[in-house]
Amino acid sequence: MRPRALGKRGASIVAATLIVTATFAAFAQPGPDDPGDEQPRAEPSRGSSLSSRLSPAVAQRLLHSPAFDDRMRGIRRLGSQNDYGAVQLLLRAIDDDPGLVAEPALRLEAVRAFAPFASRDPVRKLLVTWAADTSSRGRTAGPIGELAREQAAMALASTSNARAVEQLVLAIIDGGPAGDRAARALEAHPPRNIEPLLQASSLESPEVVNLIGQIGDLRAIPKLRDLLKKADLDVKVAAAVALARLGDASGVKLARDWLAQDGSTHTLRVGAARTLTLTRDPLAPRAVAILLADPATRAVGLTLAEQAPTPQLSPTLAGLLTIERGEQRVRVLAALARAGGPLAVKTLGALANKSPVDVDAAFALAHCRDAGASSVISSLLSTPRTRRAGARAGLVRAAERGEEPDGLQDAIATLAASRDDADRSVGVFGLVLTDKASVDDYASSKDDVSVMAACRAALAKPSAAREPCLIRLSAASNPVMRDSLAGTLLGAESPRGVSTNTILSWAESTRVSAPIFGRALGPRDHEAFRTRIKRLLTSGDPAVRSQVAIGLGRSPDASTASLLTEAYAFEADPWVRRAIVSGLALRRSAVGRAWLEQAARLDPDTQVRSLARHALAGRHIPLPSRGDQILWLRLSATAGSAPAGGRPVRLVMSNGFATAAVTAADGEVLVPGLPPGPVLVRVAETPTNGSPPVPGGPAKQEKSNP
């Protein structure tokens, strides 16, 4: 069973519909230009002579060795000397034999060695070549090769060297993957001197103009205004949007004209809608509605409707529900809920009252910004057929919007006393979530459904409330129960009463809870278990790698920093790199700091760079706090597949921490306490591993798909 969009027909379905709060990054405004050509950023200070640390003969021997490990050691030793003379040895070796760094890992390590000297002409030229590499085959292809190309571009941009910026701008003008790479690098490291971006030839490229808007440099406003008068149409559109991003409404009149033109192109309509939305113009809703009406521009229209919700869009969005299916329909429902207004409430209420219940609409109703949605949910609670869906919607609304619908408490009490497993799961969960019952009331119950529901609700409670669940975990023999209770290990806790060997065996299993137990190994890290922990840190499952890295941040062993830096060096998955940086941030070691500095400068992932900068500034990266978001997950089984009920699922939250849950008998589950942001979902193929199943699933061996 693979996660899919809620409502898609003819396939196994997972809908992780979590309404999140958009976070907008604010760009720092660059300071005034330096006089004359900008100076390169300071290179590392020179240490003792090169010959006293690594002789040229030894360097040459290592670099030209047929053994991969020798060449890697040679590159690392030269790079670690923080000396341009050492880097020149590496440059000459590569010039003599370009194949020396043909392997992606070697090239990536060479990029890191060259990065501090990227403003020097020979280094800059080589990095430009590597950043522009478009190889999709051969030895430099693959994720590590792409990471090397991304970091080469980041190294160039981070220097703010005018020639380096010029080369990156040329790449943007040329377009393609290299251009996208260059744009991301300059957005990550806005140049102090923006003249290369403002050259006449540069401003002929809509992509460059768009980048100027993303960078947020107000010094570009006069040039952008000029483009509105004399540039070609595509550049005018890009300039109007860029100005709007900078808070300048100069392009609004043009945008209104484009909107009024008969037969205007898709580009004009999209540009007009973006400009008017960013400037909060009264015509913005009409512009977005025009995009929504056209299948070719509907996706952009939905994005703008989500970013700038208004009841004026409700009629258009409600109309789309009659024609959209699958993932697109879920997006329309979410946009309609955000738009609000009486029509949105009426439309969502009618859909939720259908038989069978439209769960997508019920979830959207829970998030509808109009207060009237609570009354509609109350009507769902009063009818047995819709009570369970109404209770889920009411609990989500109460937790996220602070509006508890009338009748919610009576409904969850009724459900908690039901003989139906799915009803009881929702009822017990609701009683604990709303503090009408405690986790203690159910943690020792013989009813597995009630235990799992109560402990899942504890995710939204202080850590002390989860203690009964951890005690139950230590004695859990049913693997499905263990999967569910593992979700209560939110931080770096290690369950008491369970031996380290047992936790290791759980972490080495194929169950969805394995990464959580891998994280729990951190505080117990010891030389006796280091070989097995290292193996987990190189697991083929990214979730296992990430959780073990987070846990190792709490290791009592000082050597853990080196272990984490080795893991970071060639990790292609950004989610795992974030976890490794979070672990390194807790170590406070010299070797860890050096790698954090590299990550802050060179990593292509925005969140990795942000975490690294926070750590370098001495800001504490806390363990996950309880969020106020609730994930409403629904699995739908296709014909012939295992039931969707009683299915363990793993969730990796936006803060990098993993949790787990087990779906109720109807294939749905609410998971509280999540932070805003995307959620990665992995679903167990079957719910058990040779043990008696909990209600809702057969007894078959688990097999999970990523």
Image: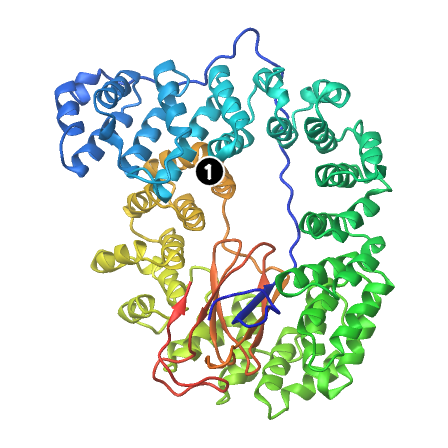
271 with respect to 554 (left or right)? right
The image shows residue 301, relative to residue 201, as above or below, that is below
Mark 1 Cα within 10 Å, few/some/many (few <14, many 20+)? many
Work out which residue is located at the far bottom of the displayed protein and give it: 419
298 with respect to 510 (left or right)? right
What residue is rendered at 57% in x and 7% in y?
35
The image shows residue 343, relative to residue 274, as above or below, that is below
Work out which residue is located at the far front of the displayed protein and give it: 263
Point out residue 603 in the picture as x, y percentages from the top left corner: 44, 37
Point out residue 134 in the picture as x, y percentages from the top left corner: 40, 34
The image shows residue 75, relative to residue 323, as above or below, that is above
What residue is rendered at 55% in x and 78% in y?
667
Q: Which quarter of the rendering shows the C terminus?
A: bottom left
Whether residue 66 is visible here, answered yes or no, is: yes
Point out residue 617 in the picture as x, y percentages from the top left corner: 49, 35
Asked where in the image residue 69 lies, by quadrant, the reply is top left
Of residues 502 and 523, which is closer to you in this image?
Answer: 502
Of residues 626 and 515, which is closer to you in this image?
Answer: 515
562 with respect to 268 (left or right)? left
Q: Amino acid at mark 1?
A: Pro
Q: How many marks?
A: 1
371 with respect to 625 (left or right)? right
Point out residue 575 in the picture as x, y percentages from the top left corner: 45, 50
The image shows residue 55, relative to residue 255, as above or below, that is above
Asked where in the image residue 142 lies, by quadrant, the reply is top left
Work out which residue is located at the far top of the displayed protein and give it: 36
| Secondary-structure class at tag 1 | loop
Which residue matches tag 1?
A: 604
Of residues 233 and 616, which is closer to you in this image?
Answer: 233
Q: How is the model colour-coded?
A: rainbow
Whether residue 526 is visible here, answered yes or no, is: no
